[in-house]
Image (cartoon, rainbow, N blue to C red):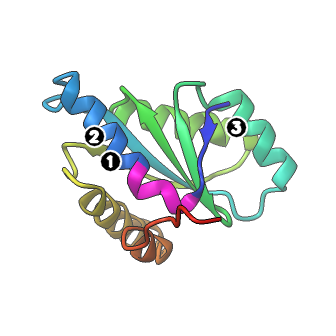
Amino acid sequence: MGVPFSFYNFSGLVDLQRGIAERQNDSRLEAFCILYCDFSGFEKSKIADSLEQVIRSSDAYVHNDNAYFFILYQTDLYGASVVATMFEEFFGSSVKHEAVSYPKNGETAQELFDAIQANAKKHHDIDLECLDHNSHQMPSLNP
């Protein structure tokens, strides 16, 4: 099913994956991908079922409304496209999606967010404005 995180921890989660990749000296490879999927129009229960069937337990995800972002560990862009196809097969319809990989498409969370925003705008005319705010907000440690 993957591990869900708060959307407001997305930037920190990407930084964590970058750190793991650097520590394992995987930075020259496509150490991880961020896959964006637009699940607009799908029922929440169906989305939950898809997460259980498609996403590996080693992967993490966050979402903001119907915009889901998956951090796919040790996955290249081809692998991310396979995951997107699995979602399409599960739902029985097309799912708007984009993917970027570290470090190929960016070396910081902000660079990766900028790349996925540009791709979503170019290919689907979708503004992922939620990523503008995410990279600048730090979660509060106070309850």
Q: Which residue is mark 2?
A: 18
Residue 67 pos. (x, y %):
59, 62
Quadrant showing the N terminus: top right
Would residue 106 appear left or right of 65 to someone viewing this image?
A: left
The span shown in magenta is 7-12
The residue indicated by pointer 1 is: 15
Image disc number at residue 57? none
- Residue 123 percent across, percent down from the top left: 40, 66
At label 1, counting other C-alpha atoms closer than 10 Å, the crowd grade (few under 14, some 14-19, many 20 or more) is some
Of residues 5 and 69, the one nearer the viewer is 5
Quadrant housing residue 39? bottom right
* Residue holding disc 3: 51
In space, the residues marked 1 and 3 are separated at their CA atoms by 23 Å
- Residue at x-position 50% and y-position 65%: 139
Task: Work out whether residue 91 or residue 39 is closer to the camera in this orientation and state it.
Answer: 39
Residues at marks 1 and 2, CA–CA distance in whole angstroms: 5 Å
**Which residue shows up at 16% across the image and 24% down it?**
25
Q: Residue at x 65, y 42 (%)?
A: 88
Q: Amino acid at mark 1?
A: Asp
Few, some or many residues within 10 Å of mark 3 (<14, 14–19, 20+): some
| Residue at position x 34%, y 35% in the image | 32
Amino acid at circle 3: Leu
Q: What secondary structure is marked by label 3?
A: helix
